[in-house]
Image (cartoon, grey):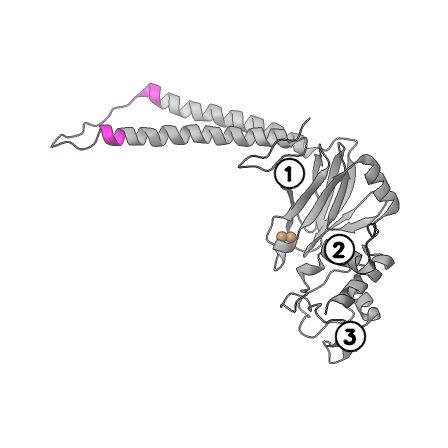
Amino acid sequence: MQPTAPTIQLPMGNSTIAGQVDSMYYLIYWISVVFFVGIVGAMVVFLVKYRRRGNEKGAPTGHNTALEVFWTFSPLIILVFLFHQGFKGYLFGLRAPENAIEIRVRASQWKWEFEYPGGMRQNSELRVPVGTPIKLIMSSDDVIHSFYVPEFRIKRDVVPGMYSTVWFEAINEGEYTIFCTEFCGTSHAAMLGTARVVSREAYDRFLAEGVGPREGETPEQWGERLFSENACNSCHSRDGAPAPGPTFKGLFGRTEQLEGGASVTVDENYLRESILQPQAKIVRGFSTVVMPTYAATLRDRQLDALIAYIKTIR
Ligand code: CUA
């Protein structure tokens, strides 16, 4: 199977369901074009042909059984056919193949967390092997989000208090953007992620070795990458701009006034605690926003790198 080429209307389709989705889309599109041209064309012809001339009076039209039957049953046949085709595609997308790899997806304001078989967790990046069915088992910690990767042609709501599932099989390796497509609050637009389709070997290596710095990356550079991968930027600005959380500009060494009257000087321990237990010390004015904990997704080395990076934001 080949990925579908991008067109003016649709991005490239890199999954086994993309072909079905696209042909259904274009079928409906072209049926609509034919009817649009036919109806508007007939309207224009009749407008000209039967325009008012002198004092001529229009005669009432009678009943035409053949015409009535034709325009009742032809749309019905088209509708039943479209329903049949659409339902076939729906069933195909509903049940993941038996051998699918199950990946747990947790959505929260405003990040995606992925948990792989074996328990490794990662924020904002979904790494999957090429040519393998992947079943996503999704839930939300707070409000309704929606998981969407246009190139895979899959989109499914992620709802608090229940699981929803969706599956796909990528045809080629590549990198695609994950969107949240349900308005979920202030930083909804920044609730992005990356779906990275890699070879089976690279996927197995990734599961075995976990997430580390790239080759030649300094702790600060790795920290900067973690900053965006963990979507810190959706709540913390780096330039002092107002945001749901305190800005990181000049954060290290600053004295923060806390809710309840105490104050704290920002050092490594405060940063570490705030990432792992965000509710321990709340900066004054930020008590209405609940930061999610990163205790399950960030390991010591990653915390070190993130703190190293935060120190550089002056
Ligand atoms: Cu999550 Cu929009």
**Among the two numbered marks 2 and 1 on one chain, the one whose residue lies closer to the N terminus:** 1
Are the two marked residues, 2 and 1, in contact with CB atoms closer than 8 angstroms?
no
Q: Mark 3 points at which residue?
A: 253
Nearest to the eye among marks 1 and 3: give it. 3
Q: Mark 1 points at which residue?
A: 151
**Among the two numbered marks 1 and 3 on one chain, the one whose residue lies closer to the N terminus:** 1
Position in image of residue 295 (x %, y %): 82, 59
**Which residues are the magenta region?**
46-67
| Horizontal arrangement in the rendering, residue 262 relative to residue 208 (left or right) | left
| Horizontal arrangement in the rendering, residue 213 relative to residue 241 (left or right) | right
Q: Residue at x 86, y 58 (%)?
A: 301
> Which element type, helix, strand or loop, lies under badge 2?
helix
Q: Name the residue under label 2.
A: 225
Q: How crowded is mark 3: few (under 14 residues within 10 Å), some or many (20 or more)?
A: few
Q: Residues within 10 Å of mark 2 (few under 14, many from 20)?
A: some
Position in image of residue 24 (x %, y %): 56, 29
Q: Any magenta on residue 60?
A: yes
The kind of residue on which mark 3 rests is: Gly
Q: Which residue is drawn at 82% across and 67% down?
A: 273
Q: Total of numbered circles in the picture?
A: 3
Are the two marked residues, 1 and 3, in contact with CB atoms closer than 8 angstroms?
no
| Horizontal arrangement in the rendering, residue 199 relative to residue 176 (left or right) | right
Q: Any magenta on residue 251?
A: no
In depth, the one of 263 and 129 nearer the eye is 129
The kind of residue on which mark 2 rests is: Arg
The kind of residue on which mark 1 rests is: Glu
In the picture, the quarter occupied by the N terminus is: top right
